[in-house]
């Protein structure tokens, strides 16, 4: 049985946008789409009884209504909706474990105020054992084909040429996939997800890595790291760029024209009960305008 693409619906303005993003991703992967909401009664919170009841009704209603809306845009897609009861991070983490990936909507694009400020989003990223994609509110119109930029409707590459590294083989699609690579400890899970995402989209893959060694040594390490993936995904065009000093800024800036930005998640750290995802990932997530996939090491 094919694992679904799962969307965790929440009370942010990006939630329905994440559902549209998830529907397109499920179509690309020939997978079913699963819409879930996670709700837990808060008896000791400052919220009123009416607020709790409204949240409970929302958790039942919105996934079902969104599923019905999506079926009109994706008539051949298998779409289900359900409400999970329990602590949202744990419930969404379990849903992710049963899926190819989990998408979560966030408040907005650009500055992304509060992007990981919400405890549910940050905790879910930290505990999930599968990739989690954080999607901004602008994706609803984008996935429906509304507000498409000049050139994008014809499948042209409108991402610009900010990273002038070499393009290695394969066709170039519109909107590259961008991946950050730590040459000192490259993640197979992150690279595998990025190459697969680029292949599914017929898109270029932009590989951004920090520079800590002489350029020739970095180039050798990068080619050795990517060689198995070139063989597995010969259709993917790859362009590499060395970020000097501030890789988080380079990744965020590259994401301005990207279809997807892919980050790795290493060993999880916890401080005073607060889940931590790493300073660089945190910086990229707060700056990047594209959907961002955070891929954990297994």
Image (cartoon, rainbow, N blue to C red):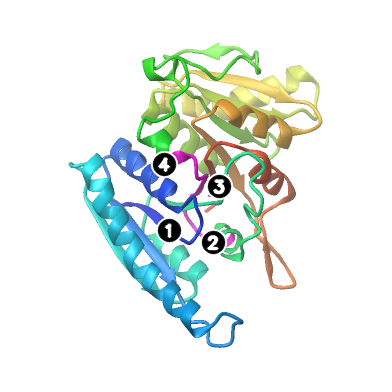
Judged from the image, the secondary structure of the residue bearing numbered disc 4 is helix
For marks 3 and 1, give the one nearer the viewer: 1
**Which segment is the magenta one?**
126-139
Please tell me how crowded label 2 is: few (under 14), some (14-19), or many (20+) other residues with Cα within 10 Å.
Answer: many
Query: Which residue position holds label 2?
Result: 124
For marks 2 and 1, give the one nearer the viewer: 1
Residue 86 location, quadrant = bottom left
Mark 2–mark 3 CB contact (< 8 Å): no
Query: Which residue position holds label 4?
Result: 140
Mark 2–mark 1 CB contact (< 8 Å): yes
Give the spatial CA distance, label 2 vs label 3.
11 Å
Query: Which residue position holds label 3?
Result: 294
Horizontal side, residue 215 vs residue 186: left or right: right
Residue 63 visible in the displayed image = yes
For marks 3 and 4, give the one nearer the viewer: 4
| Location of residue 40 in the rendering, given as x and y in whole percent from the top left corner | 46, 77
| Location of residue 283 in the rendering, given as x and y in whole percent from the top left corner | 71, 44
* Nearer to the camera, 199 or 267: 199
Judged from the image, the secondary structure of the residue bearing numbered disc 1 is strand
Upstream in sequence: badge 3 or badge 4:
4
């Amino acid at each position: 049985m094919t694992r679904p693409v799962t969307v965790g619906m929440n009370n942010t303005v990006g939630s329905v946008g994440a559902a549209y993003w998830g529907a397109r991703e499920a179509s690309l992967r020939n997978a079913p789409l699963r819409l879930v909401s996670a709700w837990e009664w808060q008896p000791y919170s400052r919220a009123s009884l009416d607020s709790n009841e409204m949240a409970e009704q929302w958790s039942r209603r919105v996934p079902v209504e969104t599923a019905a809306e999506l079926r009109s845009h994706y008539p051949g897609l298998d779409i289900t909706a359900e409400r999970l009861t329990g602590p949202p991070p744990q419930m969404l983490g379990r849903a992710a474990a049963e899926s190819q990936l989990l998408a979560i909507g966030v408040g907005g694009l650009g500055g992304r105020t509060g992007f990981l400020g919400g405890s549910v989003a940050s905790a879910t990223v930290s505990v999930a054992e599968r990739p989690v994609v954080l999607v901004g509110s602008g994706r609803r119109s984008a996935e429906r084909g509304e507000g498409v930029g000049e050139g994008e409707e014809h499948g042209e590459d409108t991402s610009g040429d900010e990273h002038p590294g070499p393009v290695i083989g394969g066709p170039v699609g519109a909107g590259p996939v961008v991946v950050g690579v730590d040459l000192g400890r490259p993640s197979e899970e992150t690279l595998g997800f990025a190459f697969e995402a680029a292949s599914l989209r017929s898109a270029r893959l932009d590989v951004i890595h920090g520079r800590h060694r002489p350029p020739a040594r970095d180039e050798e390490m990068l080619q050795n790291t990517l060689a198995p993936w070139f063989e597995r995904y010969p259709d993917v065009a790859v362009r590499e760029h060395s970020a000097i000093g501030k890789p988080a800024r380079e990744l965020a800036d590259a994401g301005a024209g990207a279809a997807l930005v892919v980050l790795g998640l290493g060993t999880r750290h916890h401080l005073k009960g607060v889940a931590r995802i790493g300073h660089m990932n945190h910086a990229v997530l707060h700056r990047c305008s594209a959907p961002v996939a955070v891929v954990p090491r297994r």
